[in-house]
Amino acid sequence: MSKKALISVLFAVIILAAALFTITRITSPEGVKPKPEATDGVSEEDYSRFFSSPEASNAPSMSEASGASSTRYEPVHPVNIGSEGVYSPVTLHHFVPENLRFTYFEILNRLKNYEKDIVLSRAVSEDDFLHILIYIRDFNPELFFIDWSLYNYKATSDSKITEVNFTFFEGDTGQMAASLESKVKSVVEQANRYPNLFERELFVHDWLINNVTYLVDEKNTGSAYGALVESKARCEGYARAFQLIMLRLGVPTLSVIGTAENERHMWNAVDLYGEYYFVDVTFDDDANEKNITSYSEQEISHSCFNITDEVLLRTHIVSPSGSSDKYGAYQNLVLPECNSNQFNYFRIRGLAVKNLNQFKYVLERNASNKRACVLFEGEMPSPEELQSAFRDFFEDVYSYGGYSIYYTPVTSPVFKRNVYEISWTVN
């Protein structure tokens, strides 16, 4: 076969693959870790081949590219937040209603002393008792050793709770708690080296992705202990670990319960400078699928980092407050509104664009990395419009080079959040 015929065949295959390509995300039995599934013969990767330029050799570098100039496109710049001091740890106790606080603190303090059998000083109703347990569970992620599904209680004839008996997981509870505290202190110390709360929050998010392996059906994976000490977690473990560290950094942080892709799921809401934002570390962690052990910031997904209600609800369902579940598994007793974009990752890093001209500017600014992750604010361009913008930019910058582009498929949850992940190679 001649070289010209071979090139024609290759083009036909690429065009056919682009036309047929679809990708879905599947979940494990516990549900929450998205995993790409290859179809139509495409390899199992988060990025798919979008299109390729005609073959060429000796491609120029960015500085050598014909006519490359940052003045051609509308600029988008990162935000300088500045520096601030170290904050004292915070708690979430103030969210507990005043009429429940006495019993809340009584049970909490006894559990922190590893007491399983607790006689209450004041009898409480069953509803109040259930709410107190949910507050203790969801506001104190350091209590990893309690099996919240296996407690018993005694009640009076008028259904007032007078005594509760907890079940602890197996192991030396005191030694495990000391190991968790040591790891928390280490991560907090590293985070506090960064200049402000946003950068510290970002460090914790990225640290968990680089240091925790997503696992479901193993002991401790639903706790901060499993994530931080044993480096393994499912969604609940990621959320509890993130919450515990952020509270120590002085940032009020809640764990939020709901579903994603029809499976149980947990993520976080953080109060950053007086506004709440959603953060889903589990959804941003795809290192296991990519077989990567250490990510740089540019390689980590941040599509679920400091996002709003509107963006989250494209891929998540938040459980309503109140439930008939005996153990309160689906109750969000505190659920803030998340309406601000101010400290969204893409805005702070100068990766949020309003039009295709700004999109090209971000591509050009990241040309040396040969990758960019871009948030489109407002209406998402069509795949055809993006393809045209890609071609315009790459043919300008790499006018003599062959190139291949990989991108987030339009069926991906990331795309639903108006985020495009792009990487490219130059021949």
Image (cartoon, rainbow, N blue to C red):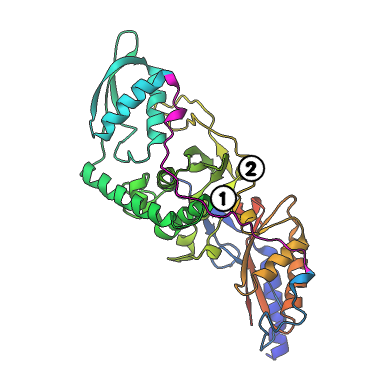
Disc 2: which residue: 340
Q: Quadrant of residue 72?
A: bottom right
In the rendered structure, the answer to whether residue 41 lies left or right of residue 123 reads: right
Q: Quadrant of residue 9?
A: bottom right
* Residue 359 percent location from the top left of the image: 72, 63
| Residue under the point 34% across and 32% down | 149
Which numbered disc flags the more N-terminal residue, 1 or 2? 1
* Residue 3 percent location from the top left of the image: 69, 90
* Residue 63 percent location from the top left of the image: 68, 81
| Residue under the point 68% across and 61% down | 77
Q: Amino acid at mark 1?
A: Cys
| Count of picture labels | 2
Element class at badge 1: loop
300 in relation to 282, above or below: below
**In which quadrant is the C terminus drawn?**
bottom right
Instruction: Decide: few, some or many residues near mark 1? Use Cα within 10 Å; few <14, some 14-19, many ≥20.
Output: many
